Image (cartoon, helix red, strand yellow):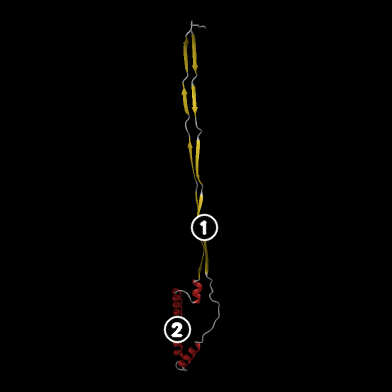
Amino acid sequence: MHLRIKTVFPQLMLDYQLPQLQIKQQLGRFEYEYEGPRIEIDQQQPRNELGMGDLRHFARRVVAAGRQTSLTGIARRAQEGDRFAREMTSQNTVAQLAKEQCFDQIPEINVDISPKTRPEIEAIYGVKIHWIDGVTDMEAIINPPKIDFIKGRVDISLDKGSKLDLKG
């Protein structure tokens, strides 16, 4: 008889996948808004100087001229009254005052450049820039290793034969 020993060694089966990193990226960008080019010309003051202004300017000018005319008229009448009171007996004051008033009405002619102020000119151009940050999304995929353990074994069997031969 023979003693037969068959040994199967234990095995460790290791299976793994490398880790993965997925990156999704949205790049930064900018958005812009712009206004213009636009030119605004304000000719109100030169037009007012030429007498072609709006109603408010005309009313202010007429009110100022009327006030000045009334103050000048009041002053002239007061002076004439004082003169008339002083010279009433000595000479013909009424005729003299009428004669002076006739010659005071001769207009004076002046030549000048008009308008004196320049129009207001404004150039408008604007840019607004808004920066929008980019986004990065990272995802790590980690798979655990797969481990299989196969147990070892020892098989002992006796072969049939004539005798058991044990040697030590």
The picture quadrant where one finds residue 62 is: bottom left
Name which residue type carries label 1. Val
Residue at horizontal 45 percent and vertical 83 percent from the top: 73
Q: Position of residue 68 (x, y in %)?
A: 46, 79
Q: Position of residue 23 (x, y in %)?
A: 50, 41
Q: Please say if 103 is above or below 145.
A: below
Q: Please say if 153 is above or below 102.
A: above
Q: Position of residue 80 (x, y in %)?
A: 45, 87
Mark 2 highlights which residue? 73
Name which residue type carries label 2. Gly
Which element type, helix, strand or loop, lies under badge 2? helix
Residue at horizontal 49 percent and vertical 24 percent from the top: 12
Query: Tag 2: Cα neighbours inside 10 Å, few (<14), some, or many (≥20)?
Result: few
The residue nearer to you, when weighing 99 against 132, is: 132
The residue nearer to you, when weighing 126 against 144, is: 144
Which element type, helix, strand or loop, lies under badge 1? strand
Looking at the image, the residue that sits furthest to the front is 161
Q: Which tag, 1 or 2, sits closer to the chain's start? A: 2
Residue at horizontal 47 percent and vertical 15 percent from the top: 155
Query: Tag 1: Cα neighbours inside 10 Å, few (<14), some, or many (≥20)?
Result: few
> What is the CA distance from the residue labelled 1 to the residue labelled 2?
60 Å
Q: Comparing marks 1 and 2, which lies closer to the viewer?
A: 1
Residue at horizontal 50 percent and vertical 38 percent from the top: 21
Looking at the image, the residue that sits furthest to the top is 163
Q: Please say if 59 is above or below 159.
A: below
Q: Position of residue 92 (x, y in %)?
A: 46, 94
Mark 1 highlights which residue? 127
